[in-house]
Amino acid sequence: MHFKLQSVFSALLLSASVVNSQHIEPFPEIPKNLALAGYKYGDEIPLECIQRNMETGEHKFDEQGNIIYAPFPKCFETDSPLTLKYGVDEIFNCTIDLGHEFFHVFQLYIHEDVPFSCRIPFTKSQTQNPAPPADSPEAKAATLYTSLTFNIRGRVQESHLDIDPFLNVAMVANTSAGSIISSIGFSSGSKAQRFIIGDSLPLAMAVRWYQGPKLPTASEAYFSGSAIFFYSFATFVFTAAICASVFYYYVFPKKLKAELRTTLPLTNQFYNTKSD
Ligand SMILES: *[C@@H]1O[C@H](CO)[C@@H](O)[C@H](O)[C@H]1NC(C)=O
Ligand SMILES: *[C@@H]1O[C@H](CO)[C@@H](O)[C@H](O)[C@H]1NC(C)=O
């Protein structure tokens, strides 16, 4: 029963979100007085990350109440903060220092109390016309960014952290505009390593760029961001959920159901779990 309600409910939620998505606005919204110059292949992209209180994980704020960002920690290999290169697929190491404060913040990341949130400029340069004074709040507020969040997995242990330091970084670019549509970094190794306060953490990064808002799937089909596709997909899911529920609960003969439970290992397992 739970299963049926859940699937119908999630299908309803999905279609509700489709109704909302009909109010389409550009993202990011580019102000009229902002002139953008796109990245070119190989251009350096600086990363900056939200600074957090090591006790609570709360953002740090400046006197005006703005969230404080700072460059991504320095990589020992280059002796400078991590940067990416526009359009360049690359594999490299960036070893960072897990000093006292950052180690505690890292515990919060690994425990998934707070996200490891960074951002990168949406385009190479962004010029306001007329230009406000440099470093004024208006100048800072105008910059458009794309978020780059690192989902680093591991376990918080009593005396140390187990961290999977092998990261995939997926970058989605609009190459005709030289902008960055979206990006994400996530642990993908099959091993975790042990780290204590003061250790250095060798992040092994594999960066891969994708052109346009589409990621190839395993079957080489494409997931598209288009509203029409999404609408028909949601309708499909909704209809399928209703059909499946009707078939499973009303049309399937009881006997067949009983048989399925005993003969199919997966179904069997499913019915033996507590959640059912
Ligand atoms: C990264 O570091 C590991 C371990 O030290 C090393 O084996 C590997 O070759 C390095 N990779 C690159 C791309 O430098
Ligand atoms: C790429 O950027 C151009 C210029 O801003 C815009 O017209 C176009 O819709 C963008 N394409 C995608 C896929 O975001």
Image: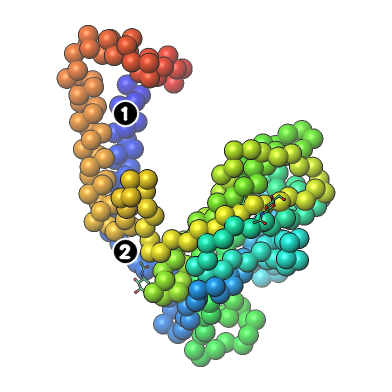
What is the quadrant of residue 6 in the picture? top left
Q: Residues within 10 Å of mark 1 (few under 14, many from 20)?
A: few
Measuring 66% from the left and 70% from the top, which residue is drawn there? Answer: 64
- 218 relative to 158, above or below: below
Mark 1 lies on residue: 5
Q: Nearer the viewer, residue 100 or 192?
A: 192
Farthest-out residue, left: 251
Q: Earlier in the sequence, mark 1 or mark 2?
A: 1
Measuring 61% from the left and 54% from the top, which residue is drawn there? Answer: 205
Q: Nearer the viewer, residue 57 or 45?
A: 45
Q: How many marks?
A: 2
Left or right: where 189 falls relative to 267: right
Mark 2 lies on residue: 24
- 266 relative to 131, above or below: above
Residue 172, can we see it? Answer: yes
Residue 142, can we see it? Answer: no
Indicate the secondary structure of the residue bearing disc 2.
loop
Left or right: where 120 falls relative to 236: right
- The quadrant the N terminus occupies is top left
Q: Residues within 10 Å of mark 2 (few under 14, many from 20)?
A: few
What colour scheme has been applied to the protein in the rendered image?
rainbow
